Image: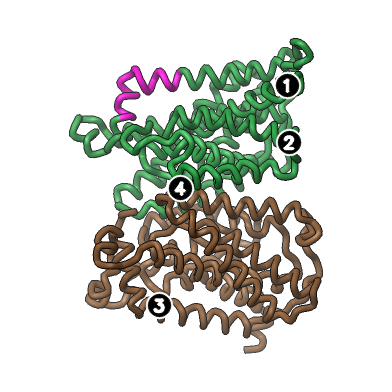
Chain colours: A brown, B green
Amino acid sequence: MNDLLAAYGNLIDMIFLNSIIAYSVWLTLSANMFSMATGGFLSLGAYTCVYLTMQHGLPFFAGAAAAALAATAVALILGLPLLRLRGDYFALATLAFTEVVRVVALNWESVTGGALGIFNIPKYTDTAVLLIVFVLAVYFCWALEHSPEGRARRSMRRDETPAAAMGVNIFTHKLALFAASGFLAGLAGALAGHLNYFIGPNDFGLMRTIDALAYPILGGVNSLAGPALGAAVFTIFPEFLRFSNQMREIILGAVFVLAVLLLPNGLTSFRGFRGSRRRERRMGVREKGGG
Amino acid sequence: MTVLFQQLVNGFSLGATYAVFAIGFTMIFGVLNLLNMAHGAVFMWGAYIGLACVADLGLPLALAVPAAFVFSGLLSVSYEIVIFGPLRKKEAHRWIGLIASLAMARGLVALAQMIFGTHVVRYPTVGLLSGYMEMGGVRVHTLQIVIFGIAVLLMGALAFMLQRTRMGRAIRTVAFSPRVAELAGISVRNTAFATFFLAGALAGVAGVLLGLLFNAVSPFMGETILLKGLTVVILGGLGSVPGAMLGGLLLGVIEVFSVGYVSSAFRDAIGFGLVFVILLIKPSGLFGQTEAARA
């Protein structure tokens, strides 16, 4: 066990971290919100936590809590106007947020270290912390899915108009989910900040955001296991292609495209992972197309 | 005053290339309801093909531009063949296409790195284009005129094609409703090919133009322009071709002015900051139209 941790510790850490991020994205996706704000929240969380621990000497958990709360607050402020926007405009506006955060991080040198980033960050994040947060995140999503909120969300995802007619307050639900997603992403950002001794403004840009979206989408949005499965597969798989940086990207791209073409509803659309069809029909989560 | 005019000249030549790029992006959205995140990769490949024609084959620019046009158009059509067409047939969620196109873009960027190297390369100085003329203290480079001219020509040709030709009518019908188009005997598949070809071809030429304007071509230029394209498309309203033209020029001018009067550090943020404000005031973009009237 110890050998395993020593050899693959970093990889295991990354799987947990990416899974946490994947659940943060899943919270928005499962309510038909294509949010590209994840990169911005991660960045916000990472810089907030690192700033508080390194420059103000706060303990790690206090910094991480502050980071998560800061991202939640920003998500609430951001969500109030943006959630009025229709699908693609919402996606692009949240991308605009991520980019603005990146440019601010690039230029606010006294706090973020500018383009060079911040070095020598103490490593507080270990596998145990990541595992605990991961389990809590999964539990949160599971409990949510089996609560009245989950039922409301599933009806919203199918069609918002009848859901609203049945008394679901669409806006409040979406805002709450967006805030929860911000909380989780902010927390993940704090964990990421103290994981690799270094953060830079380009760690949390468009590419990181798209990767984060790819985990639950490729894993399968209609299942609770989807985000973690997607994150695990698409964190482990690139490790096998370490022999060439560019070949790796090409093969990865090809495999992504193939995976999508063969399993357009995600990895969890494999029969084995999917659970019984009856249960799914009862939960009303089997659906195709739309959006 | 001269400074102001100088900024306008610079802004318009930059904005024209943004517009040419964004038109294709907005067309694919307007006609096929897709967000094609691999549009930037086509742009980058177009820039390299143009460069290869000029630098390696010694062709004049008048041949390099059509070469980039055709190559990028075909590359763009390959997206439809490999990704978007099959996904449409499987009725997959459109998020899937977005993710798949990004994966494709990453592969294409890596391929460009392998073939052309990761460093920034330059267009050889083209004799005729390095000149400039001065009008009342405002310096207008021949290059800027050529770029602006090509951009306006392409946009004019596209507008004509969309309004007056059979193909253009087919594209507009599919944009209105694919089902109506099929009822009218229009092949959605062929229209999709035409749309992807035109969009990619324009992006490829935009790549050559921006490569000339900044005198720099790199495998990573696609991601930057994709973000600019998104900004332009929101400014102009998703799916609106005239909106993309105006939005492109507007973004070019705003960027040049922000560098001139505010700070170059926040140039990229100003475009997105603007997007933010505009979406809050007018949620369908600056020149946004109703759904049925787009493209």
Indicate the amino acid at tag 1: Gln
Residues marked 1 and 2, same chain = yes
Which element is circle 4 on?
Answer: helix
Dot 4: chain letter: A
* Residue on which disc 4 sits: A89
- Mark 4 or mark 3, earlier in chain: 4
| Above/below status of A187 relative to B239 | below
**Spatial separation of the CA atoms under disc 4 and disc 2:** 27 Å
Residue found 57% across the figure and 19% down from its top: B150
Q: Residues within 10 Å of mark 2 (few under 14, many from 20)?
A: some
**Residue A94 point in image, percent of width and height:** 53, 54
Is B40 placed left or right of B36 in the picture?
A: right
Dot 3: chain letter: A
Q: Which mark is residue A134?
A: none
Indicate the amino acid at tag 4: Tyr
Is B130 placed left or right of A71 in the picture?
A: right
Residue found 78% across the figure and 71% down from its top: A121
* Residue on which disc 1 sits: B6
Dot 2: chain letter: B
Residues marked 2 and 3, same chain = no
**Residue B267 point in image, percent of width and height:** 69, 41
* Residue on which disc 2 sits: B259
